[in-house]
Image (tube, rainbow, N blue to C red):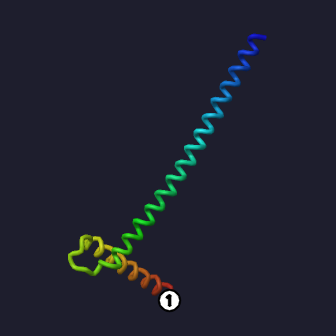
Amino acid sequence: MDLLEKVGGTISAKGKEVAEKARVLAEIGSLKSQIAACEEIIKKNYQEIGRLYFEEYSDVPDAPFEKQCTAIRNAQNGVQDLQEKIEALKGL
C-alpha cells in the first residue's frame, strides 16, 4: 500500500501544480487584457490631444509641429483627390 500512497500523493501534488499554473496563466491573461485596455485608452486620448492641437494650431505659422500639420493637410488633400477620382470612376 505504501507504493500506492506515494503514487497517489505524487499525482495529487502534480495535479495541484498544474491547477496553480493554470490559475497563474489565467491571471496573467486577465492582467494582459487589462493592460491592453489601458493602452487603448492612452492611445485614444493621445489621438484626441493631437486632433485638438491640429484643429487649434495647424494654421499658425511657426507652430511647434508645423511640419506634421503640413503633412496632415497634404494627406487630407490627397484623400480628397483620391475620393474624387473614385466618384468619377463610379460615374462611368
Element at label 1: loop
Q: Is residue 36 left or right of residue 12?
A: left
Quadrant hosting residue 5: top right
The vertical placement of 53 against 87, above or below, is: above
The residue depicted at 38 percent of the width and 73 percent of the height is 51
What residue is shown with label 1?
91
Who is closer to the viewer here, 90 or 35?
Answer: 35
Q: Residue furthest right?
A: 1
Q: Is residue 31 left or right of residue 78?
A: right
Find residue 90 and report its horizontal and vertical position in percent. Answer: 50, 85
The residue depicted at 66 percent of the width and 26 percent of the height is 14
Find residue 92 and report its horizontal and vertical position in percent. Answer: 50, 88
Find residue 32 and report its horizontal and vertical position in percent. Answer: 52, 49
The vertical placement of 36 against 51, above or below, is: above
Who is closer to the viewer here, 88 or 28?
Answer: 28
Tally of numbered discs: 1
Q: Residue furthest bottom?
A: 91
Who is closer to the viewer here, 63 or 86?
Answer: 63
Callout 1 crowding tier (Cα within 10 Å): few <14, some 14–19, many ≥20: few
